[in-house]
């Protein structure tokens, strides 16, 4: 048997491979530090609003008051969905996964507006403005309720909660959600951002890049984990079940949701901030269960996999925070996307500057010596 050997061995999962230059964000994995355009995440979380961070990611600097007023009014003016997008969402069965709804709705925006040509700031802003409306519209419809039109006088976070419930949200919920949106907006060359950049590098449109990003984010190894964290905490149920549950899972080689990261080799700084938020916003019983689970999980992960440096990732306490603002758990991944679309679009805009097609190679492990036989002669 003859097979081909390529000169370079594949880096499994592209571990450690640098695929782009970016000035947008960087994860310093050993230090447990995340930087958006020069600012450590701790500088921004709880201080800058999501709209300010969008400006930072897209334009490269925090907005002054005039710029902030402008981006706020531009985003709020673009929240309503085109009729064709509404009709697309209405056509979906109530049982549709909200991430499938978001992916379809985002794609419909590209067709309805339409979005084409080289990516623009305006397109980035429009997609980001419309994401909460897609998610809230579908959530209302699947519950047999009328969709609620967006309100231009509310912030991005407040308007999302308003469109879900029809009520002006509590200030503390808005603050928690807004901080969550800031924390999740960008994260170096994560899988969904890489996907969006690959699509952008073919000179496809920004909507296609974002739709690809949603697809990549959906998986449990990326943005699909927090609902599974809640499922895990439900199954654990009580303090005295933490140890047996975790031991059983790890004995069965099941990965614990909300732990481990490709880049962080210490605690994810976002998890630290979200832990504090979760403590403030959850019931004492729930927080005690989550904290107890985290502590025992880390102890066991460090004992069993001492070479791996596994720590709590962003998804563990995201679950608690999103739960405390009243979101259904199957909306957690789409709420992640409502934040991350700002980062995807910033990366698409950056990719367009001096773009070169992203086209890596693969290590072929198949045969090269087979001879064709007609179907009638095949065994
Ligand atoms: N629980 C138990 N063991 C784990 C975990 C975990 N959460 N994470 C990694 N490990 C172990 C693996 O079993 C493997 O052990 P082995 O070498 O003995 O087989 C080793 O650590 C390396 O794991 P990989 O999956 O190769 O690490 P990778 O860097 O490829 O994956 C990932 C990172 C996907 C986040 C992984 O840690 C994981 O699956 N975590 C659980 C899911 C999760 O929390 N996802 C959200 C990620 S955060 C985000 O994307 C926003």
Image: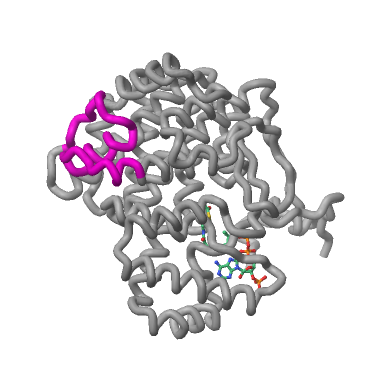
Q: Which stretch is magenta?
A: 147-175
| In-image side of 67 versus 36 (left or right) | left
User: Could you tell me if residue 90 is visible in this image?
Assistant: no
The structure residue drawn at horizontal position 57% and vertical position 54%, both measured from the top left corner, is: 268
Residue 85 image position (x, y, % from top left): 28, 30
Residue 251 found in image quarter = bottom right
Front-most of residues 61 and 210: 61
Residue 153 image position (x, y, % from top left): 25, 25
The structure residue drawn at horizontal position 31% and vertical position 31%, both measured from the top left corner, is: 155
Quarter of the image that includes the N terminus: bottom right
Q: Is residue 173 magenta?
A: yes
User: Could you tell me if residue 278 is visible in this image?
Assistant: yes
| In-image side of 93 versus 346 (left or right) | left
Residue 358 found in image quarter = top right
Residue 283 found in image quarter = bottom left
Front-most of residues 133 and 185: 185
Q: Is residue 346 above or below residue 190?
A: above
The structure residue drawn at horizontal position 64% and vertical position 59%, both measured from the top left corner, is: 266
Quarter of the image that includes the C terminus: bottom right
The image's colour scheme reads one colour
Q: Is residue 342 magenta?
A: no
Front-most of residues 201 and 324: 324
The residue most toward the right is 7
């Amino acid at each position: 048997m003859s097979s081909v050997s390529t000169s370079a061995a594949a880096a499994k999962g592209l571990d450690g491979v640098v695929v782009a230059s970016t000035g947008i964000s960087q994860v310093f994995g050993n230090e447990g530090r995340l930087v958006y355009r020069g600012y450590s995440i701790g500088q921004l979380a709880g201080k800058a609003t999501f709209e300010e961070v969008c400006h930072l990611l897209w334009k490269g600097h925090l907005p002054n008051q005039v710029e902030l007023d402008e981006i706020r009014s531009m985003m709020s003016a673009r929240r309503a969905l085109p009729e064709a997008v509404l009709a697309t969402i209405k056509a979906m069965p109530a049982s549709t996964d909200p991430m499938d709804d978001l992916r379809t709705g985002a794609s419909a925006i590209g067709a309805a507006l339409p979005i084409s040509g080289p990516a623009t700031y305006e397109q980035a802003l429009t997609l980001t403005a419309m994401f909460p409306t897609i998610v809230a519209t579908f959530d209302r419809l699947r519950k047999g309720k009328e969709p609620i039109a967006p309100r231009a006088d509310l912030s991005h976070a407040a308007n999302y909660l308003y469109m879900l419930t029809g009520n002006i949200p509590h200030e503390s919920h808005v603050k928690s959600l807004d901080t969550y949106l800031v924390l999740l907006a960008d994260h170096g060359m994560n899988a969904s951002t890489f996907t969006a950049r690959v699509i952008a590098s073919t000179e496809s449109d920004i909507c296609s890049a974002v739709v690809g990003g949603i697809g990549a984010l959906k998986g449990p190894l990326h943005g699909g984990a927090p609902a599974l964290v809640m499922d895990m905490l439900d199954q654990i149920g009580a303090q005295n079940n933490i140890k047996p549950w975790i031991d059983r899972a790890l004995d069965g080689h099941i990965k614990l949701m909300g732990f481990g990261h490709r880049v962080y080799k210490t605690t994810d700084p976002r998890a630290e901030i979200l832990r504090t938020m979760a403590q403030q916003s959850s019931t004492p019983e729930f927080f005690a269960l989550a904290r107890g689970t985290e502590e025992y999980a880390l102890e066991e992960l460090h004992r069993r996999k001492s070479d791996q440096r596994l720590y709590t990732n962003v998804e563990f306490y995201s679950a608690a925070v999103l739960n405390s603002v009243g979101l259904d758990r199957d909306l957690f991944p789409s709420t992640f996307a409502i934040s991350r679309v700002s980062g995807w679009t910033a990366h698409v805009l950056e990719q367009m500057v001096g773009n070169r097609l992203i086209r890596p190679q693969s290590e072929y492990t198949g045969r090269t010596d087979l001879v064709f036989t007609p179907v009638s002669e095949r065994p």
